[in-house]
């Protein structure tokens, strides 16, 4: 994945070009008059590694959360319940977590209702869990929770956790979008753009994305990146699925001529975060970038060789490709952040940079330790990768 | 300054004759200003020069310049004072007074809007919910004077149109039985801006700090807890002070939803007031970027007047030879061309604006477009024009010109 921002040549809003004999009423922009603040792709970005009450002192944070929950703070109940349920910052305890979440729901907390629904729809495999989940979402919706409307609409369109009902799902998403929900606009835009769950309508899909603040190829790319980053810090499966929406935006940005989009698509494909059927092969997506000695392309190529994605596994070749890396700053920035999230690939790349003396490990870990962390996460890293690369290998 | 000594002495004598009865002071002050109208005796420069060079200024009230830019005390009498208020870009809130007296436009001109408040729920002394509605609007010119009645009988906002504008205020020092001195957030809120609880004020500042620093996740974490547990006045202050700093519509929605659980009536009333306040602030920002006095006047109307008829009347008052509808369309075009609106109004929008201001029917609008763009094809003309019409009427900027 690359975060480099390149302004595409199409930045001057290529979609609005109309035939000279047709009067453009400017209807795409008229919606902007309703909002006092212009939508921006930046608004969507709230991926954060902030740990809330558990940020600096987990023990004090837990004590505070528990005390507040016991004193009747329904939002503390929700947070405590969710953390216990997912094991996020606290020892996992499904029973206790569910208990707090349900108590918050009983008190009328619509946010807890949505969280409980996500749990029932994504994590529980009991026969009636999807009925329960849908009921929780609908109750949250009745309480005025607009994001629950988006959640339910998206699930009904994509069939994620619920029996598909695209008509009803579309109705809900359109309603939320009309109420001003930016994420509803984005979802509606991506579904229409790709035909995912809805009849494909490329023009209308783009129109919704423009309304959400994404008016050119580089903004589509940026928006896709935001969604993907958000998915990385999400705790629910539905939110983690934002990668697919991101890929649709990357694909559109690529079609509009943004070169970086293909690199981001390659990243998602290589990691198996999106199915490869509807996208070009990795060779095609990476080839131009490899010719241009792009660092992210080298890392992606090395990782696919190491994993054997659309090719045979070949660690020696992978290491040779990795050794061609010239600029390691952005590479370290991206993959070290992944390692902090517990992603073994992040450990592998951070260690690999150390092996080739391309970067100093920010946490002072030895290469061997990083490689062990990658191995324990499923990477079959050869033992020789623990050793520093020789000068010849580097050259 | 000699003139104000004379005016002060006159007011002092007249009030003494009324036994210093506060109820009579608006009449006393008005009479003083009518017998010795300041605009006919002193100029803006006289006052500024005197204040900057005199050996000793009278004792100054409101040193932090909360009302006036700056306020200058020119006379101190028994239980009353005379102030000259300078205004350069001040946009006083809609407010009532805990003092009485009269004011006089000494230099420049002003747009005064008079409001009324029908309370539906007194949440506390500091906060009330109800209906804030416009009663009357008028242009005040140099030499005009108006009484100031303490309490709810005079709720107004005086928007100064020229830079600088000067008003002379002859006022009592304060009337304890007329507290609190509410400010109003149309269409629904009355609050006391002077009686902040220290802990609420500091916490509000801290919440703003989080948002200004980009710490949205941290803000969300703490804000839900506070909105779900604190009292109505604190929740009002937290939201009033931070809402505008949140750009994500979904995040805003979640905040209001979190607060609604404990304070449903407050949130129902506060939401439209927050949007109006945001609109007001946005127009103020635009106005600061515009130097043309006609455009400044138009923006002042959009900022202060909530009804179309009043807007058209005020334009006709100020520009008797101009057609008000044509003036509005021209000003919107000019603002658009200046690039200060954040969005450019293409010609079809301006044509639609004109049609709507002229109360044209759908059929007449279609005809106007067909005539204007005879050589161009208009796809889905009926629905397209419908969407354009409702988009303009819902617009944050132009809302008031479509309100009857």
Image (cartoon, coloured by chain):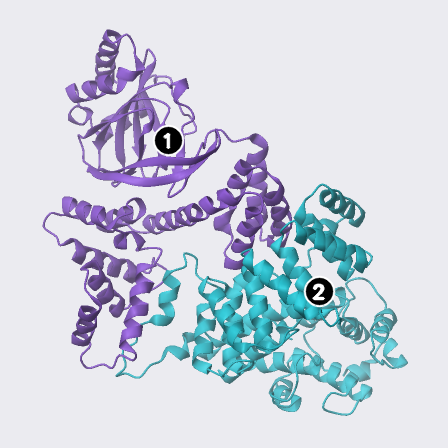
The quarter of the picture where residue A158 lies is bottom right
Report whether residue B298 is seen. yes
Q: Which residue is mark 1?
A: B67
Within 10 angstroms of label 2, few (less than 14), some, or many (20 or more) residues?
A: many
Instruction: Please identify which colour was used for chain A in the image.
Output: cyan
Mark 1, chain letter? Answer: B
- Residue A209 is situated, as x and y percent measured from the top left of the image, at 47, 72
The quarter of the picture where residue A136 lies is bottom right
Q: Which mark is residue B312?
A: none
Residue A339 relative to residue B271: left or right: right
Residue B133 relative to residue A169: left or right: left
Q: Nearer the viewer, residue B133 or B196?
A: B133
Q: Nearer the viewer, residue B61 or A138?
A: A138
Instruction: Please identify which colour was used for chain B in the image.
Output: purple
Secondary structure at badge 1 equals loop
Residue farthest bottom in this picture: A312
Compute the Cα span from label 2 to label 1. 55 Å
Q: Which mark is residue A119?
A: 2
Report whether residue A2 is seen. no
Mark 2, chain letter? Answer: A
At 66% across and 69% down in the image, what residue appears?
A131
Residue B39 relative to residue B400: left or right: left
Q: Is residue A95 above or below residue A24?
A: above
């Amino acid at each position: 994945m690359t975060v480099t921002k390149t302004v595409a040549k199409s930045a001057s809003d290529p979609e609005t070009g109309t035939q000279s004999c047709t009067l453009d009423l400017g209807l795409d922009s008229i919606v902007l008059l309703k909002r006092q603040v212009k939508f921006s792709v930046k608004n969507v970005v709230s991926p954060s590694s902030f740990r809330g009450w558990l940020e600096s002192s987990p023990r004090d944070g837990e004590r505070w959360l528990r005390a507040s929950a016991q004193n009747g703070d329904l939002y503390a109940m929700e947070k405590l319940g969710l953390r216990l349920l997912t094991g996020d910052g606290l020892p996992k305890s499904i029973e206790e977590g569910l208990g707090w979440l349900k108590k918050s729901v009983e008190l009328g907390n619509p946010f807890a209702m949505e969280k409980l629904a996500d749990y029932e729809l994504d994590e529980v495999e009991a026969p009636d869990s999807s009925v329960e989940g849908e009921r929780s979402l609908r109750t949250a919706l009745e309480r005025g929770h607009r994001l629950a409307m988006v959640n339910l609409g998206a699930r009904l369109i994509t069939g994620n956790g619920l029996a598909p009902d695209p008509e009803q799902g579309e109705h809900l998403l359109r309603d939320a979008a009309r109420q001003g929900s930016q994420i509803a606009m984005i979802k509606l835009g991506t579904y229409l753009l790709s035909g995912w769950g809805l009849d494909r309508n490329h023009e209308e899909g783009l129109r919704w994305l423009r309304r959400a603040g994404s008016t050119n190829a580089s903004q589509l790319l940026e928006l896709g990146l935001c969604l993907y980053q958000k998915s990385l810090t999400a705790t629910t499966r539905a939110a983690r699925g934002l990668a697919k929406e991101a890929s649709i935006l990357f694909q559109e940005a690529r079609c509009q001529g943004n070169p970086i989009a293909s690199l981001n698509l390659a990243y998602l494909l290589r990691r198996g975060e999106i199915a490869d059927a509807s996208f070009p092969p990795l060779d095609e997506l990476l080839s131009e970038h490899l010719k241009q000695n792009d660092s992210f392309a080298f890392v992606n190529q090395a990782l696919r060789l190491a994993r054997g994605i659309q090719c045979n596994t070949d660690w020696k070749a992978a290491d040779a490709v990795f050794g061609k890396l010239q600029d390691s700053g952005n590479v370290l920035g991206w993959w070290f952040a992944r390692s902090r999230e517990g992603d073994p690939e992040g450990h592998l790349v951070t260690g690999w940079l150390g092996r080739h003396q391309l970067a100093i490990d920010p946490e002072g870990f030895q290469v061997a330790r990083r490689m062990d962390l990658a191995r324990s996460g499923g990477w079959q890293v050869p033992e020789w990768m623990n050793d520093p690369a020789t000068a010849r290998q580097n050259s | 300054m000699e003139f104000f000594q004379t005016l002060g002495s006159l007011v002092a004598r007249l009030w003494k004759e009324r036994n210093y009865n506060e109820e009579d002071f608006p009449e006393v002050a008005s009479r003083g200003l009518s017998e010795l109208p300041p605009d006919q005796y002193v100029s803006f420069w006289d006052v500024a020069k005197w204040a900057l060079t005199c050996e000793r200024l009278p004792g100054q009230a409101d040193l932090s310049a909360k009302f006036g830019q700056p306020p200058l005390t020119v006379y101190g009498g028994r239980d009353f004072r005379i102030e000259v208020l300078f205004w350069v870009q001040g946009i006083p809130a809609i407010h009532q007074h805990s003092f009485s007296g009269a004011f006089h436009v000494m230099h420049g001109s002003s747009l005064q809007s008079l409001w009324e408040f029908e309370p539906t729920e007194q949440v506390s002394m500091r906060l009330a919910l109800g209906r804030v509605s416009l009663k009357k609007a008028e242009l005040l010119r140099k030499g005009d004077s108006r009484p100031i009645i303490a309490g709810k009988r005079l709720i107004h906002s005086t928007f100064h149109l020229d830079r600088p504008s000067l008003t002379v205020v002859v006022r009592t020092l304060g009337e304890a039985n007329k507290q609190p001195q509410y400010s109003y957030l149309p269409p629904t809120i009355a609050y006391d801006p002077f009686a902040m609880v220290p802990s609420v004020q500091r916490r509000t500042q801290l919440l703003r700090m989080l948002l200004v620093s980009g710490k949205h996740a941290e803000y969300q974490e703490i804000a839900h807890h506070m909105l779900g547990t604190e009292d109505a006045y604190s929740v009002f202050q937290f939201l009033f002070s931070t809402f505008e700093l949140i750009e994500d519509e979904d995040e805003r929605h979640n905040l209001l939803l979190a607060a609604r659980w404990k304070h449903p009536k407050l949130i129902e009333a506060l939401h439209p007031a927050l949007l109006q306040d945001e609109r007001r602030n946005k127009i103020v920002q635009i106005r600061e970027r515009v130097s043309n006095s006609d455009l400044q006047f138009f923006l002042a109307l959009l900022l202060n007047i909530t009804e179309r008829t009043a807007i058209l009347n005020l334009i006709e008052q100020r520009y008797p030879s101009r057609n008000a509808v044509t003036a509005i369309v021209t000003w919107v075009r000019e603002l658009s061309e200046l690039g200060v609106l954040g969005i450019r109004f293409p010609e079809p929008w301006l044509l639609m604006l004109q049609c709507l201001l002229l109360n044209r029917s759908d059929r007449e609008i279609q005809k106007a477009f067909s005539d204007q763009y005879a050589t161009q094809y208009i796809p889905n003309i009926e629905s397209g024009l419908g969407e354009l019409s409702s988009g303009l009427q819902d617009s944050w900027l132009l809302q008031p010109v479509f309100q009857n």
